[in-house]
Amino acid sequence: MMKSIVRLELGCALAACILIATGCGGSSGGSAGTGTQVASAPVITTTAALNGAVVLKLTSATSGAVIHYTVDGSTPTTSSQIYEAPFLVASNLTVNAIAAAPGYLPSSVTSQTFSLNIPSGTLVWSNEFTNSTGANAEPNPAVWSYVTGQSPWNQELEFYCGWDWSVSPCTTSAPNSYVGTDGYLHIVAEQPSPGVYTSARITTQGLFSFQYGRIEFRASVPEAQGIWPSAWLMGNNNATVGWPACGEMDVEERVDAPTTPDWTHGAIHGPGFTGGNLSTKYYFPSGSTAADWHTYGMIWRKGSISYYVDNPAAPYVTYTPSSLSGLSGAVWPFDAGQASYILLNLAVGGSYPGPPNSSTPFPAEMLVDYVRIYTN
């Protein structure tokens, strides 16, 4: 199931939006120039995360420069990973980076070694959605941005609204995403008029990303016909190689009304496995549903992705490159060097759940208590 992401603007033709979303015609960027000037070497800056971890940012003073980097100690080239967003550093590694721009020779290498020695299982980053303002607040704009406009994916029906949007059918009087005074992130699907639906998709794309570790979402999700809540990740290189080459990791996803037993599922998508090939259901214990509070987690290590509900010591599925056996053209994209960004959204309708009906309550609300990342 494709859920590729792109920021939509009003007036964007649907066909063009779909073209962008699927990565068609994307630029690979970063080709070395042929001039005599040398691009300015990247500058590494860090900000503190939690328990010794840092968030690393790369910049270059050369206008239009593309930064290429490695985290394995190797010397970067213009074929190395392209820097797209600040990323979490929570392990012992060396970051090497160069800048390249048209008309310039590639820069010298900037290098920094991190000897953090953070123990396994340590909390290194979190968004707790605290709010002491006395009113509904915007999700932290240093971490979260918005995908906006009519969804072009999966025949979904919703129009995604940003914070404080007054563009019809969105309204500032009923925001579709906010941090409440209860300390929860609220993502709300509304039906402002018959056949018209609004909701929110928030993302850390371009603002924060990470590679490897254990991520948890504590959430309560709505269950009703045509309702589709998700907590998931996409590779930063979506901006250059497109989907599915960037890799997609779905940590929490379910559709429609509760069942007995109730369920959620975790999936991965990449080249050659974009449908339900690698998707596994988790069935809740008797008496429990997805509408209850649960912790949905993913353990991402080199060569493996595991999903769990409530207990990280008991994953219900683990995928490895060998899971792709028998899938024609399948390529494991999750160890190509890219970090991944986070997405939270509540879709309405689409090819997976089908449309809402008279039994579907609006507003429908997905609540998120926190997003946390731990070391492996």
Image (cartoon, grey):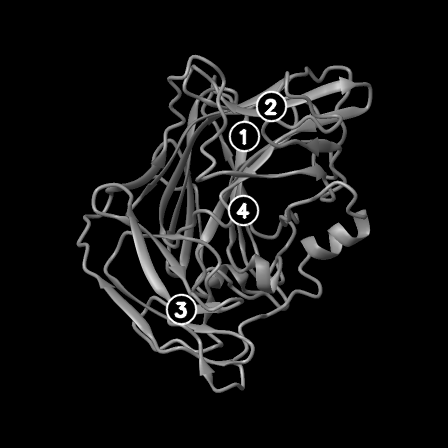
Q: Quadrant of residue 24?
A: bottom right
Query: Which element carries disc 4, helix, strand or loop?
Result: strand
**Residue assigned mark 1:** 263
User: Of discs 4 and 2, which sits in the foreground?
Assistant: 4
List the residue tagged with mark 4.
Answer: 267
* Disc marking residue 69: 3
Disc number lying in front (3 or 4): 3
Residue beneath disc 2: 259
Quadrant for residue 309, please give it: top left
How much space separates mark 3 and mark 2, taking CA atoms? 47 Å
Given the image, on which type of amino acid does mark 3 rest? Tyr
- In depth, the one of 286 and 74 nearer the eye is 74
- Write the residue at 52% across / 74% down: 101
**What kind of element bears circle 2?**
loop
The answer to which of 276 and 194 lies nearer the viewer is 194
> Helix, strand, or loop for circle 3?
strand
Q: Nearer the viewer, mark 1 or mark 3?
A: 3
- State how far apart marks 1 and 3 are (Cα): 40 Å
Which residue is at a point 65% across and 31% down the rendered structure image?
161
- x and y percent of residue 140 in the render? 45, 33
